[in-house]
Amino acid sequence: MTVRKKDEGVLLVVSGPSGAGKGTICNALRQLHPEIRYSISVTTRPQRVGEVDGVNYFFTTEENFRKMLAEDAFLEYAEVYTNLYGTPRKQVLDMVKDGQTVLLEIDIQGAMQVKKKFPSGIFIYVVPPSLQELSHRLYARDTDTQEVIQARLNKVTDELALAHKYDYIVVNDKLDEAVDKVRAIMVAERCKLSRNQEQINHIFDRYIIKEVL
Ligand code: 5GP
């Protein structure tokens, strides 16, 4: 029996300023598509109420994080508001190689590192409809101190300047529409010819040639 080589999957990288709603969009997309593999990041940030270790994040100490960094365990990492966050490298790349769709929800610094190391990734930038709305969302979320929120808002202008480095922009005004757009991007990317060479060869060999002859 010949074992067919697998086409590479899709690495979807969703980022954007915090409060833009990327987490909510990613959660909704995962509910619609349970086959999507989600990369659980490692972080030194304190666990929030309701978060589960190994589900939302792998919570760890700074010492352990730095040890993993020295061992080249991360595809990317970033310091976000005094906390360290990193994407486990091997697990993500193995899943993409295996043909899966893998979703990373990471900050902009991290997304730019992934773009360098994995240029065939699909980079989606989620933006809020306005700065006023962003500020409103960050305060309504009630998960951070006023200083942290202010720091996040101060960073937004710099972050928006990087929007042109992405493949797609999704304005998150109405959640349902934003989820639809990210879903449409994912589906279209899965259908790209370049990601379906093995599939095409298989169809060609098995059906077209035999049926024509
Ligand atoms: P939070 O602490 O609110 O969960 O996340 C803060 C920010 O860190 C968010 O913008 C989130 O997308 C980002 N983030 C979460 N995990 C990672 C990661 O593995 N790498 C990078 N670069 N950013 C991350």
Image (tube, rainbow, N blue to C red):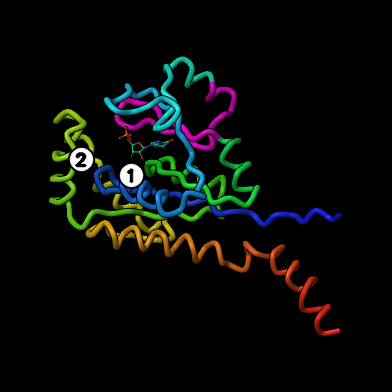
Q: Say which residue appears at 82% left-offset and 84% top-offset.
A: 212
Quadrant, the N terminus:
bottom right
Q: Residues within 10 Å of mark 2 (few under 14, many from 20)?
A: few
Q: As shown in the figure, which amino acid type bears the numbered disc 2?
A: Asn
Q: Residues within 10 Å of mark 1 (few under 14, many from 20)?
A: some
Q: Quadrant of residue 194?
A: bottom right
Residue identified by numbered label 2:
154
Q: How far is mark 1 from mark 2, CA to CA?
A: 20 Å
- The region drawn magenta spans 68-88
What percent of the width, then of the height, locates residue 100?
58, 50
What percent of the width, then of the height, locates residue 76?
49, 37
Q: Say which residue appears at 37% left-offset and 41% top-offset.
A: 107
**What secondary structure is marked by label 2?**
helix
- Asked whether 158 or 152 is in front, the reply is 152
Q: Is residue 23 above or below residue 150?
A: below
Q: Say which residue appears at 28% left-offset and 48% top-offset.
A: 21
Q: As shown in the figure, which amino acid type bears the numbered disc 1?
A: Gly
